[in-house]
Image: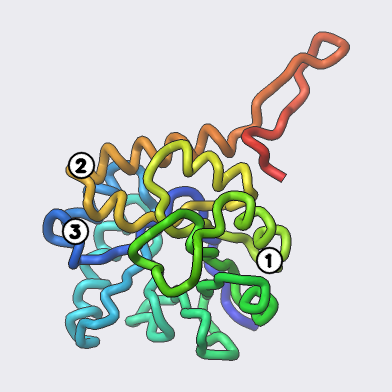
């Protein structure tokens, strides 16, 4: 039986891209972690394995202080236990503690087997995912969330609290953000702002019950 990690990605998830980061990648990630990020997906797939492995070691050290998790894009976990795979493969998924998969439509979602979660993209217009057609928008995201057999993270062009709230309302358990954090003047402040929007949208609120008590109420359209 596959060993499971303690939890699945949720909330604000940071995807790395050193080519657009405003400063050294580890410093940008550390700043975002200071603002509340607890899940980081290491991309940088153009780097030689040795360099990418060294980067993974540095990022794991940053996340260790806050009990965070590094997920590695691609099938090689770089001596870790969590990966995020492209839609194209490999199939079947490797046996690791956490396996995510990038998906863009119902056909790709239907191919999921033992994956733990999926990203759905692009939700909003983005230069990072130009090859996957027009943006889904929250309405399309909602339809794919309903079709997914696993929890879904929204990805693509998410830059504002309003967009975060719309993704939560559509049923996403988290939002994966690249440009808004990599390019931020203060990744910490941006992470705090977006993370607070997610938490507020995900937190049930109370409404008065007929007998004068409080009844829980689902917040911001959560299913």
Give the class, few, some or many, for how many residues have Cα within 10 Å of label 3's Cα (few <14, many ≥20).
Answer: many
Quarter assignment of residue 72: bottom left
Q: Residue 96: image x %, image y %?
A: 51, 80
Give the class, few, some or many, for how many residues have Cα within 10 Å of label 2's Cα (few <14, many ≥20).
Answer: some
Does residue 93 lie above or below 116 as drawn?
below
Quarter assignment of residue 57: bottom left
Task: Identify the residue at horizontal 39%, vertical 81% (top origin).
Answer: 77
Q: Residue 54: image x %, image y %?
A: 19, 76
Whether pointer 1 and pointer 2 mark residues with C-beta atoms closer than 8 Å, the reply is no
Residue at the disc numbered 2: 186
- Point out which mark residue 21 bears: 3
Does residue 82 lie above or below 223 as drawn?
below
SS for callout 3 = loop
Task: Identify the residue at horizontal 51%, vertical 37% (top origin).
Answer: 199
Q: Is residue 152 left or right of residue 72?
A: right
Quarter assignment of residue 64: bottom left
In space, the residues marked 1 and 2 are separated at their CA atoms by 34 Å
In space, the residues marked 1 and 3 are separated at their CA atoms by 32 Å
Count of marks overlaid on the render? 3
| Residue at the top extreme of this rendering | 212
Q: Is residue 181 left or right of residue 136?
A: left
> Mark 1 or mark 3, which has the lower sequence index?
3
Residue 98 visible within the image: no
> Mark 1 or mark 2, which has the lower sequence index?
1
Q: Is residue 191 left or right of residue 118?
A: left
Residue at the disc numbered 1: 148
């Amino acid at each position: 039986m596959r060993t499971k990690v303690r939890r699945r990605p949720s909330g604000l998830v940071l995807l790395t891209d050193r080519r657009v980061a405003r400063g050294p990648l580890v410093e940008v990630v550390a700043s975002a972690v200071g603002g509340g990020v607890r899940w980081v997906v290491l991309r940088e797939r153009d780097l030689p394995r040795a360099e990418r492995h060294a980067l993974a070691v540095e990022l794991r050290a940053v996340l260790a202080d806050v009990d965070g998790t590094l997920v590695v894009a691609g099938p090689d976990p770089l001596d870790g236990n969590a990966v995020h795979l492209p839609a194209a493969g490999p199939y079947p998924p490797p046996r690791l503690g956490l396996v995510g998969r990038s998906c863009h439509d119902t056909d790709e979602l239907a191919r999921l087997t033992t994956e733990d979660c999926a990203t759905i993209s692009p939700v909003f217009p983005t230069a990072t995912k130009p090859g996957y057609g027009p943006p889904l928008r929250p309405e399309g995201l909602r339809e794919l969330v309903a079709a997914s057999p696993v929890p879904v993270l929204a990805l693509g062009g998410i830059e504002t609290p309003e967009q975060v709230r719309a993704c939560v309302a559509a049923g996403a358990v988290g939002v994966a953000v690249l440009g808004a954090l990599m390019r931020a003047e203060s990744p910490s402040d941006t992470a705090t702002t977006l993370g607070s929007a997610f938490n507020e949208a995900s937190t049930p609120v109370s409404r008065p019950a007929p007998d004068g008590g409080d009844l829980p109420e689902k917040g911001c359209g959560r299913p």
